[in-house]
DNA sequence: GCATCGAACGTTATATCATTACACTCATTT
DNA sequence: AAATGAGTGTAATGATATAACGTTCGATGC
């Protein structure tokens, strides 16, 4: 299942994954959600909140759990993961001043990846 | 509808809203989604991606559209909005270096608000 | 005036995402 | 062996969101 996700390069919904792994014996959504939950716990999978979908962790669980961001291309669906240590720290500090204790941050960027920006301008010209 | 959202102080799902405004003649989800879409366009409502829910804009559309973040209390559900101009700019710059053109950013923090942290430590002591 | 058009709206149905409930298996403990 | 409890599989359902389609109504051109 993790292999499927990693191969996809984009985010897959639980039902996308279900379709992909039916051959391997998983038959119901709840089984996929349980597996995803476990993988997320191990830091091998991230959930993309704005897509209600999942990606394989690009960084092989290098303990960055709470400071990861995603750039999501609206055109091709590609999701790239990057670390945002300093940004996450700044946000925590900022909200801490009003007494809020941050446990988890979600940072997601929507836009166009390099490849799609290139194609877009060609088409427009 | 906006009044309902503003009064709530927390995020409401489209169906929460639907229940609240049935008296005012809205009868189906799609009507609520259409209204929300319009309000979002006007900058009066924000969507909280990690909750699949909506909040009234706390800043009266002061043109901060693309640089707003939310601190969401896991205990009481309170959502507070704050501006993250510099953070959003930094993220845009950062991804721009790899050719990604950011159109929209989502920043959401989960944790405990001041009030709930206080209560929590009392209970724990 | 009135035919035409298109945007907005209402209704119904359906698609999509996620969880609950419960029975069964099987390893562990006693 | 009986009791316990974690994990698993299945079915059903709940929660979120959109599609499809007909109607209304104001704007436009004749």
Image (tube, coloured by chain):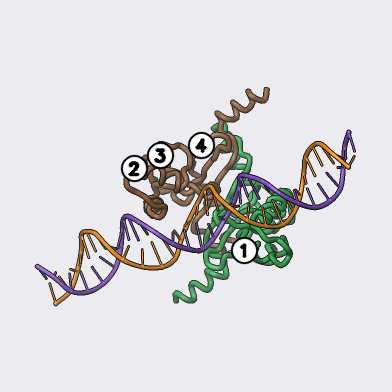
Chain colours: A green, B brown, C purple, D orange
Mark 3 or mark 4, which is nearer the start of the sequence? 3
For marks 2 and 3, give the one nearer the viewer. Answer: 2
Q: Chain of mark 2?
A: B
Badge number at residue B78: 4
Q: Residue at x 60, y 57 (%)?
A: A53
Badge number at residue B113: none
Residue A52 in percent (x, y) is at 57, 55
Looking at the rendered image, the quarter that the C terminus of chain A falls into is bottom left
- Between the residue at mark 1 and the residue at mark 2, the CA separation in whole angstroms equals 39 Å
Left or right position of B69 against D20: right
For marks 2 and 4, give the one nearer the viewer. Answer: 2
Q: Residue at x 60, y 42 (%)?
A: A90
- Between the residue at mark 2 and the residue at mark 4, the CA separation in whole angstroms equals 26 Å
Say if labels 4 and 1 share a chain: no
- Between the residue at mark 1 and the residue at mark 3, the CA separation in whole angstroms equals 37 Å
Q: Nearer the viewer, residue A43 or A86?
A: A43
Q: Residues within 10 Å of mark 4 (few under 14, many from 20)?
A: some
Name the residue that disc number 1 marks.
A16
- Between the residue at mark 2 and the residue at mark 3, the CA separation in whole angstroms equals 18 Å
Secondary structure of the residue carrying tag 4 is loop
Q: Kindly indicate whether the residue at mark 2 contacts the one at mark 1 (C-beta within 8 angstroms).
A: no
For marks 4 and 1, give the one nearer the viewer. Answer: 1
Residue D10 in percent (x, y) is at 67, 57
Q: Chain of mark 3?
A: B
Name the residue that disc number 2 marks.
B23
Q: Kindly indicate whether the residue at mark 4 contacts the one at mark 2 (C-beta within 8 angstroms).
A: no
Secondary structure of the residue carrying tag 3 is helix
């Amino acid at each position: 299942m993790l292999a499927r996700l990693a191969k996809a390069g984009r985010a897959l919904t639980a039902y996308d994954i279900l379709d992909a792994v039916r051959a391997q014996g998983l038959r119901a959504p709840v089984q996929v959600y349980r597996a995803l939950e476990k993988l997320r716990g191990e830091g091998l999978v991230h959930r993309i909140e704005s897509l209600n979908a999942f990606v394989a962790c690009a960084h092989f669980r290098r303990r960055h759990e709470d400071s990861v961001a995603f750039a999501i291309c609206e055109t091709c669906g590609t999701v790239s993961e990057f670390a945002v240590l300093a940004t996450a720290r700044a946000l925590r500090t900022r909200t801490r001043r009003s007494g809020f204790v941050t446990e988890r941050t979600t940072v997601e960027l929507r836009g166009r990846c390099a490849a799609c920006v290139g194609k877009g301008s060609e088409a427009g010209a």
